[in-house]
Image (cartoon, helix red, strand yellow):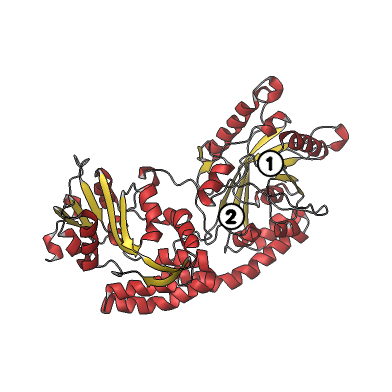
Amino acid sequence: MAMSAFPDVKKCASIGREKHTVVADMDGTLLIGRSSFPYFALVAFEVGGVLRLLFLLLASPIAGLLYYCFSESAGIQVLIFATYFGMKISDIESVARVVLPKFYSTDLHPESWRVFSSCGKRCVLTANPRIMVEPFLKDFLGADMVIGSEIATYRGRATGFVCKPGVLVGKNKADALKRAFGETKPDVGLGDRHTDIPFMAMCKEGYIVLPKPEAKAVTSEKLAKPIVFHDGRLVQKPTPVIALLIILWIPIGFLLACLRIAAGSLLPMPIVYYAFWALGVRITVKGTPPPPVKKSTGQSGVLFICSHRTVLDAVFLSAGLGRPIPAVTYSISRLSEIISPIKTVRLSRDRATDASMIKKLLQEDDLAICPEGTTCREPFLLRFSALFAELTDQLVPVAMVNRMSMFHGTTARGWKGMDPFYFFMNPSPAYEVTFLKKLPPELTCSSGKPSHEVANYIQRMIAATLSYECTSFTRKDKYRALAGNDGAVVEKPKLAAKKWMGC
């Protein structure tokens, strides 16, 4: 049977299919992109680092030659071996759950999704390893069943090989579908290449998804649930060209990051702004910041309420003001303590102790705080802790936003000590600091407003400025989603007084 025997997916009706079963391929069908290399590259980098990514990139020409000239199954097997050999299964599962969904969601085919989402029972049949794709397909596309290639394991690690019957391509796909459904025929089959014909022929209706790289991906609002939290270091999907650029840039970027960090740590704060610009770090300041507090008048310091994007928020706030602003923080790495240009104080998470400490700090100087308690990459603001609103009426909201082109400067799974380095390893990272109007006294707790109302009001102010969405998610929600814990930090012996970085 030829591909021409199947009509275009555009001709498939999506009305009245609530009781129908759909079976769809993944690459080139549910996803616009026909290549799975970027997703293997993500696993390789996030679990195995830059050397594993290099190994995968070197193996990709062999995989491509086998795939297009000899055997599609053999080509995919090469990618699987180069990516997974020796990796812990738990690490692969973690990346599949917290890294890949963000990238998969930006490549969802509109026509395939229209049909797939209209059916009551959804099955995905793919040559990709099931362990790699199942979390995204079930959690964000509502798939009821995922049938994929099964990677072989030994003592909790992947061997790099595939369990029998092998990579699910051609007849293997059809056999897997028959094992799952028996004699029952699925209502709709969606595929995009000739090796999908055997399983599509087993469905009551079959539709082909023609390659259209220019197709506009489905927006995230149409997913089963929004992607609020995700992890991983890479900003862009690593195509072969992007992967090569990343590998070549990392040594240069690390040296550049060290230079930028040294400039921020060693130079006086009034000069840091200009030094960053000279080194390719862009800082944009909007709004009118308040003047420094005059200690001679006995006036309490201003509390800057910042949205939290990276550990460097307070550093860029200080650079924008031209003077160091102390900050309070929940947790920070020891390395960041050493290289920081500003003073910060660690919160204990004991309400009375923290309140007393913040009040004391405000008597000495201005202070910065990030009441979300943790960072969020997406255009959402987490719930603001209301403690700060009870301590002073000198509140200045600050909307922080950053831009990175290659690496994320945050992580929930990795070592946080590398966060500043990854941020500064971007070719030209940028921060935008927007000072909003100081809260009038009648909107603070000093006028009888409940602290949670003040916190929620400031959250809405910052969200409106950034065009972000307010949420009620907390630090615990983030770490449960990304790291499988509640984000609690075990108290370690305190070091002698030092300068620490971040908020």
Give neighbour class at mark 1: few <14, some 14-19, many 20+ (Cα, 10 Å).
many
Q: CA distance from mark 2 to mark 1?
A: 18 Å
- Asked if residue 184 can be seen in this view, the reply is yes
Q: Residue at x 46, y 64 (%)?
A: 43
Which residue is at the front of the view, 421 or 491?
Answer: 491
Residue 212 locus on image (x, y percent): 27, 60
Residue 325 locus on image (x, y percent): 75, 46
The type of residue carrying mark 1 is: Ile
Q: Residue at x 22, y 40 (%)?
A: 18
Which residue is under mark 1?
Answer: 369
Question: Above or below — where is 73 with respect to 483?
Answer: below
Question: Above or below — where is 498 with respect to 328?
Answer: below
Residue 462 locus on image (x, y percent): 57, 37
The type of residue carrying mark 2 is: Thr
Under circle 1, the secondary element is: strand
Question: Above or below — where is 291 with respect to 322?
Answer: above
Which residue is under mark 2?
Answer: 410
Name, please, the residue furthest toward the front. Answer: 155
Residue 258 locus on image (x, y percent): 68, 66
- Using the image, tell me which numbered label, if any, was put on residue 252: none
